[in-house]
């Protein structure tokens, strides 16, 4: 038996979350069994646990889009007991039982080797948020962005993705301008490497189709007017990586920045990236992140503590990352 956070839908269509005991015999997928050491709480997990977003495709569900641990049992020639692994996305915590548990039954192709020298806890403190920030940085680089081209905007900067986007861009010598609603977090954002801070209200209202060209690049985890305004203020041939929707899923923009400035909007989907790209992203994260700095952005909660923390996360009261000690 193992402990898991499990979600049930009750009669009024709301979601009930509770820690419960399950048997591995109940795993819907079972090619590889992983003993989970650490998981994490992402925005998507908070939506699933609270039932405030249509994340879970069927109930009962074990939430958690990330996990890190050790292979306990494998029917696949690709993995052996004792292998250190992590999983991000692939629909775990949405369509398949996820990481907020002590065990997971998984398909072999979902597993990524845990890169040295990261521990399972460090990998989960990076989690989908850090991996998505790295995919976003890789997209900016693929489109030719270099630090000498000018300032790079990071939106939702105090959140999970924004924290890592700020750290990674600064590490590569970019001049990062962090947009946040939490201006009291200025010192924190500067410690991560932000060169300047703007209030998110400057970006979150209806703006003009085209404004003063300010950004050479953007990593946006907010969407809606914020993304539209970020595009409208991006330089000629600049690039904007769009990875989130914390303000909204809409995109109230015009084609002006695309046809008059030739900017590129690059969409980031972390869930179904091929293993080759995941491997590159994770080995870069292991090499390029300052692990001591990472520790300062991380708070730890228990499996049952994740239920309470989900509300806090959606209310924008969590700075940086939450790791979940499932044991
Ligand atoms: P967090 O909740 O940790 O961070 C989101 C941040 O966005 C907040 O901290 C806040 O930053 C800002 N924000 C929140 N509400 C608003 C608002 N109404 N207007 C403007 N800014 C707002 O979430 P994550 O960083 O984990 O995820 C961010 C987004 O990215 C989510 O939408 C998530 O679903 C998406 N995502 C997408 C992935 C993909 O594969 N494309 C993968 C991972 C995440 P501040 O307090 O600094 O203002």
Image (spheres, grey):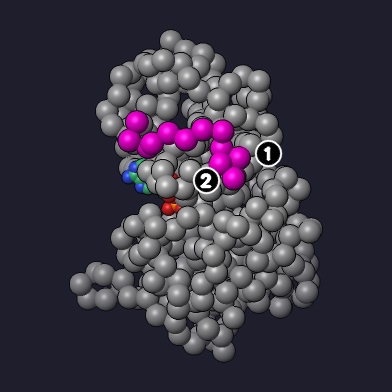
Mark 1 or 2, nearer chain start:
1
Between disc 1 and disc 2, the foreground one is 2
Image position of 255 (left or right of 186): left
Q: Which of 258 and 74 is in front in this view?
A: 258
Do residues under tags 1 and 2 come within 8 Å of each other at their CB atoms?
no
Please state, as top left, top right, bottom left or bottom right, where the N terminus lies in the image.
Answer: bottom right
- Picture residue at 34% right of the left edge, 31% below the top: 202
Q: Give the range drawn in magenta.
A: 190-202
* Circle 2: element type: helix
Image position of 220 (left or right of 39): left
Residue 205 covered by magenta stretch: no
- Picture residue at 51% right of the left edge, 13% below the top: 236
Cα distance between the residues tagged 1 and 2? 17 Å
Q: What residue occupies the far left of the structure in this picture? A: 12
Give the label on residue 187, or none: 2
* Residue 311 placement (x, y as % from top left): 35, 64
* Residue 124 placement (x, y as % from top left): 61, 62
Disc 2 beta carbon < 8 A from ligand 1?
Answer: no
Residue at label 1? 171
Q: How crowded is mark 1: few (under 14 residues within 10 Å), some or many (20 or more)?
A: some
- Residue 275 visible at all: no
């Amino acid at each position: 038996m193992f402990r898991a956070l499990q979600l049930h839908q009750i009669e009024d269509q709301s979601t009930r979350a509770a820690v419960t005991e399950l048997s591995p015999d109940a795993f819907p997928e079972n090619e590889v069994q992983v003993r989970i050491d650490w998981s994490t709480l992402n925005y998507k997990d908070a939506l699933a646990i609270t039932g405030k977003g249509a994340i879970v495709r069927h109930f009962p569900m074990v939430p958690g889009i990330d996990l890190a641990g050790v292979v306990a049992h494998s029917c696949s020639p690709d993995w052996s007991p004792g292998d250190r692994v992590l999983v991000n996305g692939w629909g775990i915590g949405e369509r398949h039982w996820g990481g907020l548990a002590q065990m997971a039954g998984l398909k072999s192709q979902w597993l990524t080797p845990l890169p040295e020298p990261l521990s399972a806890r460090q990998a989960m403190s990076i989690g989908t948020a850090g991996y998505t920030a790295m995919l976003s940085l890789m997209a900016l680089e693929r489109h030719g962005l270099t630090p000498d081209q000018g300032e790079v905007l990071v939106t939702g900067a105090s959140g999970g993705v924004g924290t890592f986007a700020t750290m990674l861009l600064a590490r590569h010598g970019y001049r990062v301008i962090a947009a946040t609603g939490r201006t009291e977090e200025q010192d924190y954002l500067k410690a991560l490497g932000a060169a300047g801070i703007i209030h998110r209200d400057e970006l979150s209202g209806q703006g003009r189709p085209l404004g003063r060209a300010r950004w050479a690049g953007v990593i946006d985890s907010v969407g809606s007017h914020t993304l539209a305004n970020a595009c409208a203020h991006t330089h000629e041939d600049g690039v904007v990586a769009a990875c989130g929707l914390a303000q909204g899923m809409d995109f109230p923009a015009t084609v002006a920045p695309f046809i008059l400035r030739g900017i590129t909007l690059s969409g980031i989907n972390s869930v179904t990236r091929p293993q080759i790209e995941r491997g590159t992203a994770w080995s870069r994260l292991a090499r390029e992140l300052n692990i001591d700095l990472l520790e300062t952005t991380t708070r730890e909660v228990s499996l049952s503590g994740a239920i309470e923390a989900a509300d806090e996360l959606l209310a924008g009261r969590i700075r940086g990352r939450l790791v979940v000690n499932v044991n």
